[in-house]
Image: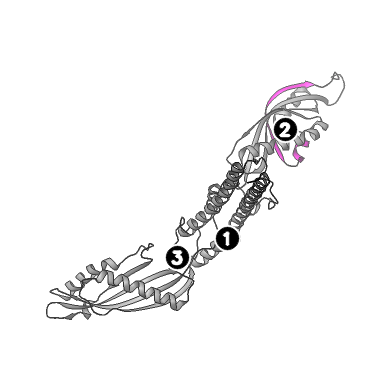
Amino acid sequence: MTDESIADQIRALHAETAAAIAQRQTLAVEARAALITALRNRLICRPGCEDALATWGLEPLPHRWTICAEAQLSHTRSHVDHQEAREQARFGVPEELRHLEPAIAVYPHQVIDVTPASNTSSQPGPLPYRITVQVTIQTWVTATREADAHEAARQIMQGHLPALADAGITVTGLTWHVTDSPDAIPAGDAVDASPAPGAVRATGLADDLSAATAARDAAAQRLAHLKHSIRVRAIRALIDDEIGGIYQHTAERVDGFLTDLGLDGLPRAHHLTVAAELTLTIAAGTAREACDTARDLMHAATTSTPDESRPWTAYGWADPEHATPEQDGWRIPWRHEYEMWLRSDSSPDAATAAAEALARADLNRVLAGVDHHQITVAAAVEAFGIDLYLDPDRD
């Protein structure tokens, strides 16, 4: 193999790596936006939305954070005397602080110093005093993480300092902290304006063929993992009834969520009911005893928990009033009904034939060695839609 052909392979691997990274980034942005849209439209609850974002490793929902700082505030104001200056410093702050945008709140709680600003005490009227007060500063920011909220608050305050300095106000010794847990903000405000990512350039890729192959495989695996994680969580929300409403309507919404993201839709199935009629010959003293024995025999064909081997629920019954006595027992008419969800894109007729064959095979299995008469089986298609029985890991 020539150096040129190896170089071509490496370039192709780099391109595949970049494509996988770009697809994953696009999927992450679109999945987050779709999930928050569902939250805004009240189709899902906030805890479920937050859990899904965390499960997928995506950016969490923003919260409204109350961020506080302890600081020293110094300003110069005119007062008639030292007592008035100290009294007003305990309860008031300069008016300029009330009109800042983004807004901050300032709460004085300890006067540190009150000093005449000039030697003009002999002059009549109010005199300037330089006042320093220990204060608590509070502001509010929207951010996804506490560290981001702290940084946003620091930037807000940093942006205010020049205007405050122009008004003769200084703020020093800022120490930030969070006083309250973050508040959930309305879902309509939770979608950030992140654009869909454009072309992604993979950097730092090795020029070695094996390393380039490993990088491509890793990027593809990360993309596949996110696709699988999104699908599993969406199906889990559906089957655990996290999303309220009629099943098929809710399932169609989940299906649309997946297909809008470019993922495969949910598996569809024919919903069928199958009715089977047969007669059992039971040795028993009374009709009631014969019916009880028949019920015990047919228990093996009764199930309320569908699985891969028996994708149905089934139950049956007999009526003692319709039992017919025989020489050594009773003839018991038995009706057995199945409700099936059969995955298939075939015609309703084909689905009906398949359902009848499955029911007949199940009954023949249970009745092997049991004295019984002809089994009549009839199936009917009730609907065609998203399968009622989904497995998050398999589907």
Q: Amino acid at mark 2?
A: Gly
Q: Residue beneath label 3, please?
A: 388
182 left or right of 115 in image: left
Position of residue 222 measured from the top left corner of the image (x, y, whole percent)? 57, 48
Q: Earlier in the sequence, mark 1 or mark 2?
A: 2
Q: Earlier in the sequence, mark 1 or mark 3?
A: 1
Q: Does the magenta segment cover residue 68?
A: no
Q: Earlier in the sequence, mark 2 or mark 3?
A: 2
152 left or right of 238 in image: right
Question: Is 115 placed above or below 207 here?
Answer: above
Position of residue 49 measured from the top left corner of the image (x, y, whole percent)? 55, 52
- Observer-nearest of 65 and 271: 271
- Please provide the residue range marked out in magenta: 95-120
Q: Quadrant of residue 79?
A: top right
Q: Residue beneath label 2, please?
A: 92
**Residue found 21% across the figure and 72% down from its top:** 370
**Residue found 74% across the figure and 33% down from its top:** 93
Residue 303 can be seen in this image: yes
